[in-house]
Amino acid sequence: MYDKPFKTFDELLDVLSQRHNLNIPDSEIAKGIITFIPYYDLVNGYKEILMDGEKFSDGTDAMTLFLFHVFDHDFQNALFAPSVSIENYFKNILAYVLAESFGVSTDEYLRYSHYLPKRRLGNAEVRRDRIIPKLKDIAFHTPDNPTKFYRNHHNHIPPWILLKNVSFSQSIDLLRLLKRTEKNKILEFMIPIHESPVDCYPVLLYTLTIVRRCRNTIAHNLKFTSFDCSRYMNNLSKKSLRKFISPLLLSDEELDTYKFLGGIYGYIILSLSLIPDKITKMLIVHRLLSTFLLKNDGILFSPVEVKIRSKYFEGLNIPSDIRERLLAFVNNLCKSIN
């Protein structure tokens, strides 16, 4: 006997109604919802926000649950784009520094002597003798372009080409293993706040980490509502963070307690802080703000959407005035451009 046996969609509706107290006024609509959206995503995905123990809060019905899911995924889609921009930006700077410091051939910029033997990462280690062979294997054997094309048609594979086929995680590991001179060069580009590199490096590393983990959570449809990166916030200088993050996005009091920095709002403000291009920042904010608009203004369940948005932000520890903060931030950007 299995504790999670197969159930038909009709049987799952009974479980939602009887065991989880979900109000199902129209069984056909509800069945269409669970046919389209996995049962696990609806129940376990929002458990901490919409449920008390194993039961949905009084008044929660199938349509409310569906609209909550729609808003959640609209918001996640808006959050995904900045992570791609940041990955490309980081790899571009990393490739620039590797080529400038070591050369444009894999024999040069992947030479062991350019990197530290290992770096500790919590209970794990990033090791030179593991990451460098992985990158060389990509250079010599990947079936994917553009590295494959350069391998077949050019006499070397420069770092800006190889990194196209290297994962975000592997690129960050390479950063960890770089020696101080090259790390400082990267910091001069990405954290130009005129603070000590010793203080700036943890800020960059944490920003890249929270961006990568948030992106992976979205891309692999993992549980988003419990996203938390606070365990990676090691040795973050408040002075450096204050120069890095606009006070329009995070107040002095919030920064002093690291409030919001470990969750989704931390991902948003650190992403906006890292991206150097003001137009890109404005486009990111515009897309985020568009998800806050009511999709069905004038239709009966618009008030439900307002309640959903409020409940969602509260559950994800996002400030209730996020819209006002983002508007103030983008308005300030507009003034600086003009």
Image: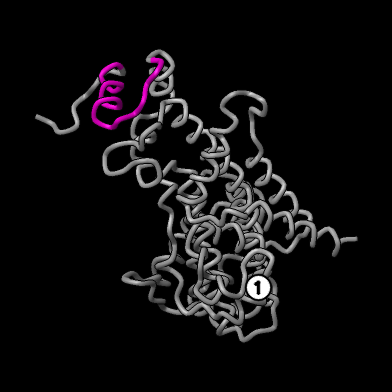
Write down the residue under mark 1: 244
State the image coordinates of residue 186 (x, y, percent, origin top left).
Answer: 64, 74
Q: In the image, 271: left or right of 192?
A: left
| Start-end of magenta stretch | 10-26
Q: Magenta segment: does it hold 12?
A: yes
Q: Quadrant of residue 155?
A: bottom right
**Which residue sits at x=48%, y=35%?**
69
Amino acid type, mark 1:
Phe
In the depicted structure, whether residue 154 falls above or below residue 4: below
Q: Nearer the viewer, residue 221 or 84?
A: 221
Give percent across and percent down for residue 55. Answer: 29, 37
Looking at the image, the residue that sits furthest to the left is 1
User: Does 25 sit above or below residue 326?
Assistant: above
Q: Height in image: 184 above or below 285?
A: below
Side of 309 where 101 appears, left or right: right
Name the residue: 85% across, 64% down.
Answer: 336
Which residue is farthest top? 28
Which quarter of the rendering shows the C terminus?
bottom right
